[in-house]
Amino acid sequence: MTHLIQSPFQNKKNSVVAVLIANTLVFSPYVAAIEETEYLLDTEFLFERSVPSISPKKDRTLVKRVSNQIDWLVSFYESASTAALAKDVYPVVKGIRDLFSKNSYDVVDDILAELDVAKLSHTALVTFLTTTYPARNKLQNWTLAAHLVKVKLETDGLNSDDVLHGLI
């Protein structure tokens, strides 16, 4: 009688376990880095990877968040989730207008890059887009911000095409 050698791939249960173990070993440093980045987005600093690395702790550049450096923006974010009236969003309009008058397009672009759509009211989201719309061609992150706002509005059950009519 000849014994057949069973391939490990014929045993689906063991194959799945092997794949899960391999994925954990290979991807866990990156998952940890993603989780840390999500946490850091809510804090004062952002970490950007300068060189890919196996260890999520190596090769990083510390970047201070713009949204924590600008007084009017810090103040606005404190009540941004409930901003519904023109007077509530006026600090955004005035602040961005002032930055534009100083040719600080890079700062406005960073504000758009850090826009946390989950923490802003619909009125605040649309205000960021409408206020920055005239300079959208100078702002690399405008299109991304517009897309994120569109997705957020749709997720919340609003017709984003109607709300953002003329902007996108």
Image (tube, rainbow, N blue to C red):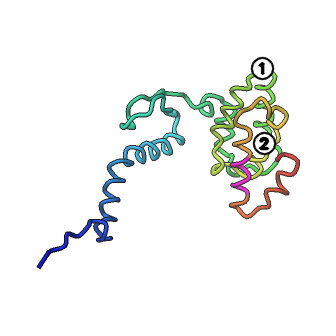
Q: Does the magenta-highlighted stretch encompass residue 148?
A: yes
Residue labelled with disc 2: 129
**Identity of the residue furthest to the front in this view:** 1
The residue stretch that appears in magenta: 147-153
Give the residue at x 52% y 34%: 46
Tag shown at residue 17: none
Give the residue at x 81% y 43%: 87
Mark 1 vs mark 2, CA separation in Å: 19 Å
**Identity of the residue furthest to the bottom in this view:** 1
Residue labelled with disc 1: 102
Q: Taken as a whole, is the magenta stretch helix, strand or loop?
A: helix
Q: Does the magenta-highlighted stretch encompass residue 52?
A: no
Taking the image as shown, residue 51 lies to the left or right of residue 165, namely: left
Quadrant of the rendered structure where residue 102 is?
top right
Q: Nearer the viewer, residue 54 or 90?
A: 54
- How crowded pointer 2 is (Cα within 10 Å; few <14, some 14-19, many 20+) is rated as many
- Label 1 or label 2, whichever lies nearer to me, is 2
Taking the image as shown, residue 60 lies to the left or right of residue 2, namely: right
Question: Looking at numbered disc 2 in the image, what kind of residue is underneath it?
Answer: Leu
- How crowded pointer 1 is (Cα within 10 Å; few <14, some 14-19, many 20+) is rated as few
Instruction: Please say if the residues under marks 1 and 2 sit with CB atoms less than 8 Å apart.
Output: no
Give the residue at x 78% y 47%: 126
Question: Where does the image place residue 88, in percent across and percent down from the top left?
Answer: 77, 44
Q: Nearer the viewer, residue 75 or 136?
A: 136
Quadrant of the rendered structure where residue 138 is?
top right
Q: Nearer the viewer, residue 37 or 87?
A: 37
Compared with residue 150, is residue 128 higher up or lower down, i.e. above or below?
Answer: above
Give the residue at x 11% y 79%: 1
Taking the image as shown, residue 123 lies to the left or right of residue 19, namely: right
Question: Where does the image place residue 64, in percent across and percent down from the top left?
Answer: 55, 28
Mark with earlier residue (1, 2): 1
Question: Looking at numbered disc 1 in the image, what kind of residue is underneath it?
Answer: Lys
